Image (cartoon, grey):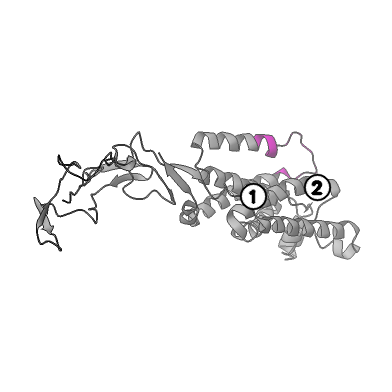
Amino acid sequence: MTFWRRRKPKWPSGEARSGPFGEQRFREVPEPDAPPDEEWAGPDPESGTYEPWESDEFTQPEGSDAGDYDLEPEEEDRPGVVRGVFFGRPARGVPDTDASQPHVVSTILSKKPGRDAARAVAWTLGILAVVSALYWWGPPGFAAALPASGETVFEQGETWRLLTAIAAHADAIHLLSNAVFLAWLIYLSYGAFGPSLYPWSAAPLSAVALAVTLEGYPPNIQVVGASGMLYLLAGAWLTLYVLVERRLSVAKRIVRVVGFFLVVLVPTSIRPEVSYRAHGIGLFFGICLGLAYFLARRDTIRAGERWEWD
């Protein structure tokens, strides 16, 4: 004799439950192997007889020779117990209870940067070293064409200086101080977001930030160095960290970002030859870049999340 078991729905049909992405409405989806909601199931194709079925419990009649089987419900059928792993947004119908809370266990920031990120760092540092060496020891006429000033960029229209000035550095100490943090930021940014963030977004925006910086200086003041791009990348990375790294609470993310800013980005001394205006403008442009990048690629970023629930 065949006995059917019909599972009860985990949630009443049409009931609204609040989840991590707002209110969701649940509905019962009938199981493919469940018989129709009637007293008797359809006729058995072999015997032509009707077979009874139990709607709530799996029972075994007395005297049956079915054997001693474990008729305990499976773990996923017990109330309040839901287990699983999924990627992207939580699937519709995942119950949101005290016993079942979905949480993020990994994001696109969790993966280790690959060789492409290392190559991007090597290419960038190589360009900075070559251009700086030409600025130090190159022909006088060639070296004079590298730095940027308000007079050369705005009055003479030599806009290429907005890029060459970022690569050129005043001396070796200036180059090394920028190269260390810039390499780390490029490695992380490229590893998580690919070339769309750096260089295709960050490099042109760094030139725009330098142009804004030159607007506030006298026309004869020359600016060189990649510190503006360094602060721009730092602003973009810290902004994206707060928006993307949902393994931690918002408060913990903000505390980490503020701590990094105070320890790494705030100068411990003021030197007259350093353009702190370029640092501030670069940081502002970086924050704007991080917000715009997240809004433009939010679905792709969220699809890289891995969720679990207990």
**What residue does disc 1 label?**
188
The disc labelled 1 sits on which kind of residue?
Leu
Q: Residue at x 70, y 48 (%)?
A: 184
Q: Which quadrant does the C terminus fall into?
A: top left
Locate residue 231 relative to residue 108 in the image: left or right. right
Instruction: Say if the magenta span includes residue 265.
Output: yes
Disc ID at residue 176: 2
Locate residue 102 relative to residue 150 in the image: left or right. left
Residue 308 figure quarter? top left
User: Disc 1 to disc 2, how far (Cα)?
Assistant: 19 Å
Instruction: Give percent across and percent down for residue 274.
Output: 77, 44
Label 2 Cα neighbours within 10 Å, binned few <14 / some 14-19 / many ≥20? some
The disc labelled 2 sits on which kind of residue?
Leu
Locate residue 190 relative to residue 105 in the image: left or right. right
Locate residue 68 relative to residue 206 in the image: left or right. left
Residue 58 figure quarter? top left
Instruction: Give percent across and percent down for residue 290.
Output: 56, 50
Instruction: Give percent across and percent down for residue 186.
Output: 67, 52
In the structure shown, which secondary structural element does the residue marked by tag 1 occupy? Answer: helix
Instruction: Give percent across and percent down for residue 126.
Output: 79, 58
Label 1 Cα neighbours within 10 Å, binned few <14 / some 14-19 / many ≥20? many
Question: Which label sits in the foreground, 1 or 2?
Answer: 1
Placement of 89 over or under 258, stated as above or below:
below
| Count of marks, rendered view | 2
Which of the pair 171/110 is nearer the observer? 110
Which segment is the magenta one? 261-276
Q: Residue at x 73, y 63 (%)?
A: 155
